[in-house]
Amino acid sequence: MIFMNLDAQLCETGATLHADICIVGAGVAGISLARELMATDLKVCLLESGGTATDTVTQALCAGENIGLPYYPLDTARVRVMGGSSVKWEVPIGGDRIGARLRPLDPIDFEYRDWVPYSGWPFSSSELNPYYNRAQVICGVDPVSFKVEDWEMGEFRPSLSRNSEDVETILYKFGERERFSTEYPKELEGSENTTVLLNASVLGIETSRAGDEVERIHVGTLSGKRFQVKARTYVLAAGGIETPRLLLLSNRQQSAGLGNQHDLVGRFFMEHLHLWAGMVVPDHPNTFATTTMYNDVKAIHGVAVIAKLALTREALRREKLLNQNVQLIPCLREDPFRYPRRKIKKASTSRMSLAGGVVAAGGGGFREVITGSRDLALRGIRQIRKKTFGLPKRAVYVLANMTEQIPNPDSRVILGEKLDAFGQRRVQLDWRITAQDINSIRRTQQVLGKALEQAGLGRFFQELLEDEPPRKTHGGYHHMGTTRMHSDPKQGVVDANCRVHGISNLYIAGPSVFPTGGYANPVLTVVALAVRLSDHLRRQFM
Ligand SMILES: Cc1cc2nc3c(=O)[nH]c(=O)nc-3n(C[C@H](O)[C@H](O)[C@H](O)COP(=O)(O)OP(=O)(O)OC[C@H]3O[C@@H](n4cnc5c(N)ncnc54)[C@H](O)[C@@H]3O)c2cc1C
């Protein structure tokens, strides 16, 4: 066999390539799946729209319109290149390394919850656990445990949630970007059973007349070549926006698009809401020194890790809340008068560090005071103080919230009228946030704030008061739910094996299959599901 990276621009128009398995998209999901299949005799063809480096013309194929809530311009929200969106991961994780936040979904995320419409995966977390373990090795974040006690070391230990029934400390790991952006693409290049075709954009999926089997995939290059790939099995791994787009565009045999007989393709688009709101003013100056686990990325057992806080599953059930985590971000906030501590303390006359509490900017000797009620007098003092010295600052923790959204059929990806360079309809994203999403964040903050106060951390100030999301609420480039998984074809696009209902040889890999998204960033689950799919496909071909 002569397999390698090929530039699709060298293919002849009208040619037909043959494979056992054709994977569309060489991002996190497609690469994970192809690598797992490297150890088999199966002939795999991996079609990637981008090349080895990003270029603006190819990237422009991702452009679309945001017609719902403000969202990132769609051509910046994912990447058309070998390695997919991993090339844009951006978290510094020590040294000059960059990575992504990784965590599995919690067991409750897989359950049917009567307060979360459309909730429930077709299987429980125990089904995915062995694949999460394999996914961690692939992402380079083993040892595989996510138990906080397995990662405690020195000052890196949970100081905030030990005695709380409602709040627990949870662990995040960071996986290195290079694995998906560089190392694994190289491995695939050297693989004997895989042909990686670069600059190969899939333009349509053609089924049998009965619509129950894919017969071929149509591929184009921006330089004008057109050819097709015939395989026994096809896997769409083009990301949570392009995968539903491809199904909707493939409407020759079924006018609503493939897998869309129940009008589900593109619906239920979910993000993780990211917002900074809520604040804790520590009671004790040395508090910051005792919470390093929550503030800094640390390398433990060779893996970069950090801790966050989340509600326990008992609290989620009792309060009927969506899953959410909170990171404590040490910040300096102007105007300590507005955010008094619980106790009266004298401020230091010198500038103090974060670990010390107040930074008495430009002045000093000023009483930090304040227990909250003498507002008028304080306002006067504040005015004079502001005019004379500028407002002093207080070191606080701001709560950085990251939360699940309810699956909402009206939050969706559809086809617009504008066309891309191939003459194909671009997407429109109608992202929605519901009142339940916001109420859940607010109530979670209250439960968490109360627990932190009881634990003696400090005073909690609720900052999310309105029904609207704060203006700076944004997503995390997590495009979930648009081809959701459900055993019932009327409620899901793919079945529990990620096969498109009604089509015998078409599968989907990637975050679009998530029926609910928890709060965990999606990559570890994407990789786990891809590994699980590889096992399933191997069995199919035995
Ligand atoms: C800036 C940024 C930071 C992120 N940080 C994190 C993080 O910290 N943790 C985390 O869990 N997640 C993070 N994510 C999200 C994560 O990268 C995605 O969830 C993940 O990449 C999804 O994998 P995928 O394979 O489904 O899609 P992608 O990785 O986007 O891959 C899709 C691939 O399909 C190709 N493709 C698309 N259409 C076609 C077509 N028609 N024909 C052929 N090929 C096609 C694309 O070129 C691309 O290579 C981040 C994303 C971004 C953009």
Image: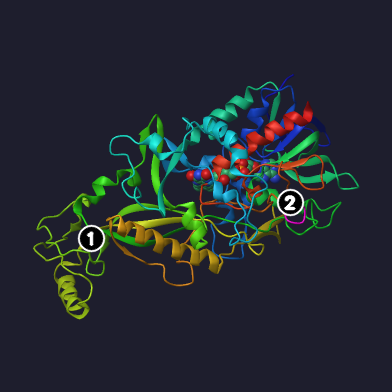
Looking at the image, can residue 222 be seen? no
The magenta segment: 489-493
Quarter occupied by residue 82 = top right
Secondary structure state at the residue bearing disc 2 = loop
How many labels were placed on the picture?
Answer: 2
Q: Are marks 2 and 1 in contact (CB under 8 Å)?
A: no
Give the residue type at disc 2: Val
Q: Is residue 190 above or below residue 319?
A: above
Q: Is residue 193 left or right of residue 55?
A: right
Q: Is residue 201 above or below residue 34?
A: below
Q: Which mark is residue 493?
A: 2
Residue under label 1? 394
Q: Depth check: give the residue in front, 204 or 223.
A: 204
Q: Is residue 412 above or below residue 92?
A: below
Ligand 1 position by quadrant: top right
**Residue lying at 63% horizontally and 45% vertically, measured from the top left:** 58
Quarter occupied by residue 344 = bottom left
Residue 347 locus on image (x, y percent): 13, 60
